[in-house]
Image (spheres, rainbow, N blue to C red):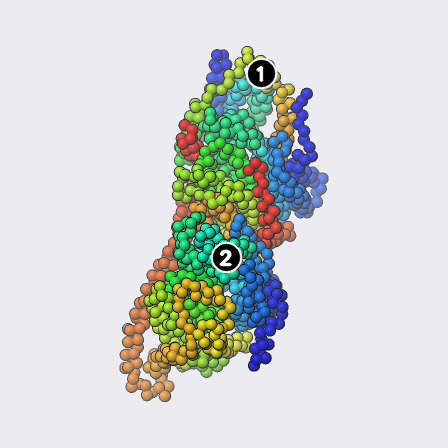
Amino acid sequence: MAEQVLFWVFAIGTIAGAGGVIAVRNPVASAISLVATFFFLAGTYVLLWAHTIAVIQVLVYAGAIMVLFLFVIMLLSLTDHGPIVQLSPSRIAGALATAALLASLVGVFRKLPPGDTVTWATDASRLSSFGTLKELGAVLYTQWLFPFEAVSLLLLVAIVGAVVVAKARV
Amino acid sequence: MQKLVEFFQTAPVDPQQAGQMLWLIILLPLLGAFITGVFGKIIGRANTHLVAVGAVFGSFLLSLIVFWTINDYRAMATTPFGSVNYAVGADYGTWFSAGAFKVTFGLFADHLSGSMLLVITGVGFLIHLYSTEYMSHDDGYWRFFAYLNLFVAAMLTLVLGDSLPLLFVGWEGVGMCSYLLIGFWYTDPAKAFAGRKAFITNRIGDFGFLVGSFLMVLALEAATKMPADVSSKLGRPGLEGSSVLARLSDGAKQKGPLAVPVLEEGSKVFASLLDDTIPAGPLEGFTFGGVLTAALLLFLLGAAGKSAQIPLYVWLPDAMAGPTPVSALIHAATMVTSGIYLFCRISWLAVLSPTAMATIALIGATTALVAALIAFSQKGLKKVLAYSTVSQLGLMFLGIGAGAFWAAFLHVITHAFFKACLFLGAGSVMHGNGEEEDITKLGNLRKEMPTTWLTFLVATLAITGIVPLSGFFSKDAILHAAHTNSIPAVAWALKTAWVLGVVAAGCTAFYMMRMYFVAFEYPRSAEAKTPHAHESSWHMTLPLVVLAVLSVVALVHGLPIMKAEGRGTIQTLMENFLDPVFRTTQENLAKRQFLVIPPEEHVPWGAYLQAWLIALTGGGIAFFLYMRFFPSRKGQPLPGPLEALRTFSWNKFYVDEVYNFVIIRPLGVVARVLWRVVDSILIDGVAVRGTAWVTKQSGSVLRYLQTGDAQAYAAIMALGLAGALVWVLQRYAL
Amino acid sequence: MLNTPTVTMFDLHVVLPAAALVFGAIVLMLSEVFLSSPNRTYMAVIALVTSGIAGVVALNNAFEPARLVLQGFAVIDPFSSFMTVMVCLGTGLASLLAAGFLKHRNAERGEFYALMLFAAAGMSLLAASNEFITLFINLEVLSVATYALTAFLRRGPRPAEAGFKYFILGAFAGALLLYGAALLYGATGTTRLSDLATLLPGAMATRGGLVYAGFGLVLAGFAFKVAAVPFHMWTPDVYEGAPTPVTALMSVGVKAAAIVAMVRTFLALVNGLDPQVPFILFSLLALLTMVGGNLLAMPQRNVKRMLAYSSIAHAGYLLLGVTALFVPDAARSSDAGGVLSATPLLANAAVNASVYKGILFYLLGYTVTSIGAFGTLAAIERREDETRSNTWDLERLAGLAQRQPGWAAAMAAFMLSLAGVPPMVGFLGKLYIFSAAVDAGLIWLAVVGVLSSVAGTYYYLRVVVYMFMRPAAADAPATFRHWTTEVALVVSAVATVALGIVPGPIAEWLSRAGMVFGG
């Protein structure tokens, strides 16, 4: 029951935060909304027994990345930019499409059969190791070796790309 | 004499080797095109001439060797179905294969393609030589020679290729070169438009060709899968019905279904299957005869595009925008005859469909007459020649439709000689008269340009059909065949076509003589650009002389001097010469009897007399009108001897009026209506502009969506996705 | 104690081409630091040599048997190996083009070539990926590299705008792909394609909606990468804004890798689904892309944009080939009518082999042709016009036949090949694809394809007309010539013609690509 309550709090909080990111005029406020979203998301991860991911979410996203965001916003001294809601054909079309997508996905989810219930009482042995740093590391460095190495390539490319794009003029 | 004949019937090289070297004939001009096109500007004018002319001459020498070789009865080309006499050929491997479909690189020269080889390289060489002088003032000379050499290479591919796809490569190649050369002087928008028109009309034809080939592939495949009870009737002496089919299917696998020998073998099978229904596959429910007729009509559409027949003839007169040597080579002697070549090549299929044969004959005859009538009202030298080309091509199609393939092909050859001579003569006239081509603004060329005059006269008489010249024999052979042969299923068709053809022949004599009299015999026009014309140099006159001589000498082919084997007693030299090519055709004809060709027992003097009278009448009327009644024009004093005609001056006026009222006006109206309806509205309006307009409009509408706004792009992507998801989920999950 | 996987050298063959490319990229970046020679053409040579080595390694892989490697996360099969060969060919030619192009603009940098090689490595790994997360990561490797390359030259607003647009929309499409993969994971509990193929039929019973939704989302993500209508909108803007050699690489490499990954993914995903769904969705995509690409290209006077739309049209022909893989069996092809109807002539297995061969040969032909076409454009592009709007107007090509006959002849060959005129390679590519489509029963769709490609000749031949039949502008500047550019143009022109005339040995090799793992 507590889990149910927590889930709804986190879920609504996540969505409200995400809405805030695009609906607020002030860039700083927008960035702060994003931080809120990240925190609520981290809470959802905890509910899913993914402790490590939750911690990384807070450390990396809510911590490092958001600080960077705020630095950039303040360095560029961005201010309010006109009204947010401007009706144009493409926005109406986009909104309609999104609504249709949402509706169809909601329809799909509503028809899903109920999943297996996992409780501490019955699955203690599984859950005690699930989502821990150790377990994650073991999977990541053995089973998921290939994608893991691919990520290192991705990071390298991203760094080089960022350097190239950040150069003033070539 | 016997020794001489023997000498020429002994191959100078091993036939096997001759077959292996066929590719060299194509390669030489191709190399020439490459060198002149890429390095032409660097190596200078003289070297460019040397390379371009030398390449075609080398090709001509090789063609001579090949031609000599195929006169030897020991020359044999191997096909999957045995070997073919009097031919050489080689297969250089697979070009490509996709599934069951395969095309090989096979070249093949028999008496038909061998003769074409000589015409293409021989006349091509003369025209190259002529062009060295004609294009001497043009800065784009290297481009010109590169295109011209490329054209020769493509035309040789068309003729030598032993499969329809290879033929089509040449077919497209000559089309592209023609297009490039028509628009050679592209600074003039009208000329560029002419190029575009040629392009579009030819695409329509190509579409027909491709769909026709596709139908043939399907039909062959269906034939090889016929059930046993049907295949039993395919048996031939020494061959079971089922093994005929197995052989056909093997051959199709080995050479590809569109190879000429495979289609030839296929035609023998079709000959027995025409009324059978195809049991399965994409053509399910159609009879073989129906499919064959459809394919042949589609091929006819293709041939009509390339050979300028109704309804696709309109590009040819406009094509005269190109340099004159181009008109002589491409739009008179070689490319435009490729439609006739195609039908001679697949004659064994053509004779299996009386509908197609009748259609070909009628279209040819109608084109011959319509074009001749239009030529009446033209003033430009090249315009008259262009319509006359259309008209002569029509006669050749009449020959095809009448089943006289050899006669049509003989006319291809003689026409190549005299029409090239006429065009080159016209070019020489224009070259010596400040590029003037209006015949009423020339005159007195007989004195001013003696060599050009003489050769032009010979060629004019040849096309008119005056007795000892080659055109007489070839044209007569066609008309004679149209008269005597018959298609029992549609008996009226050949009769009608014959009448139309005869009238067209008379008209030809009239307008050709008119042009000759006005341009050469009339006194020098006051409106002429130069007071005196100058005769061209030997680069230009030598080809004229050679071609004029050839237009006389070619008559040998039309003489009925050979003893026929089998049917009748007498044959012309050409019919005898081409006999090996049309053996399967004869077999199929004998089997189905769709076309009745009465045997020739004696020299057809009556037909000769008739043809001669037609030519004389047409020419005589022209002479009467233009030399007797119509010799002077406004503002010119009459010379003494004509003073006597003054008494007839009112009569001259009368003739002029009558001529105007009875012939020119109606013809003008007809010509204009034809021009307006067919040319302006249908071709220019609908095909050329319409295509561009429709595509542009639809393109522009779509372009409105392309605003450059990333949000809009994302919205459209989301819409696409939402559409797909909603559809799928609605249908299958919710 | 740890469940250590066994990875043998045999497994690593699949990553060797990518490893060679990454190594070359690192050498290039280091050379930027340690070598300061003013002449930097050597960089292009390094890139060329690297992609050559990678190509040879990949070619070697292509003759190995198809199998799962690296615990099922990747696949080594002739289909993906041949694709890697083509990517390496494209990368090598594009880096040759880049040498002259960048030198003219004084912008030769090691990072540029390094990013090209990184992109190629990403393409090679993407083609071999057999698991959704791996696939997504490799897709991002190639995407990030191309985003950066697009914005490499900062001249005028166009490149930055193009890079931004590409990035935003690419991220959007990537998110769709990932969401779809997540839904499929939710339905089956696996992200490995080979496991999905076995688990999907079972999952359909209870979670059919989830599977279909995931299917649609993944399809949209791939459709973006191959630039299928209506997911194509970014293409013209990005292609126009990117440096021309990069455009050349994008038009061939990205598309080729995405097509291969798409085929591999959907061969696994269609198991258990109603066969009508993939068939109709792919048919629609192919139809819209063929027709839309050609129609949009028609009014373009800007040759670079025209080529961008033409690349969309060509993606449509490739999608026609892909559709042929998903034709339902004769017994079940019932309800769709009209253009989207199919009556297969042959059994699926026979068709699939010819489809793989067709797709690969088409990609090979398109690689040499498209690189050549963009290369010619890069060669005549003037530095002074970069910020103007008429840089690539048809007028720029007017009279090229007089100014640079060799270039004009090569460009004419490329245009004819794109239009599908024999004997150029483009004709054979189309023939293989269309005949495979007809064998699969897609007769009407193939007819639409042929008709739209006939309509396409209009704008390709217009380029030829301008080059050969229009006088050069009086103020036409001297062209900037560089030997690397000319080598690239000669190689692609010769390949365009020669492959059209003698496809023999290579087409035979590609027939082996009928072995797609699990396909």
Residue B526 seen by the camera: no
Q: Are marks 1 and 2 in contact (CB under 8 Å)?
A: no
Q: Is residue A139 visible?
A: yes
Residue in view at x 56 percent, y 45 percent: C357
Residue occupying the point 56% across, 29% down: C195
In the depicted structure, whether residue B424 falls above or below residue A11: below
> Which subunit holds the residue at mark 1?
A
Residue type at numbered disc 2: Glu
Mark 1 against mark 2, which lies toward the viewer?
2
Residue at mark 1 to residue at mark 2: CA–CA distance = 80 Å
* Residue C293 drawn at (x, y percent): 46, 45
Picture mark count: 2
Mark 1 Cα shell of 10 Å, populated few (<14), some (14-19), many (≥20): some
Label 2 element class:
loop
Residue C328 badge: none
Residue A127 is labelled as 1
Q: Give the residue drawn at x 46%, y 21%.
A: A113
Name the chain under label 2. B
Disc 2 crowd, CA 10 A, few/some/many (<14, 14-19, 20+) = some
* Marking on residue B240: 2
Are the residues flagged by discs 1 and 2 from a single subunit? no
Query: What is the three-letter code of the residue carrying label 1?
Result: Leu
Q: Is residue B691 above or below residue C7?
A: below
Quarter of the figure with residue A161: top right
Quarter of the rendering occupied by the C terminus of chain B:
top left
Q: Position of residue A41 (x, y in %)?
A: 52, 21
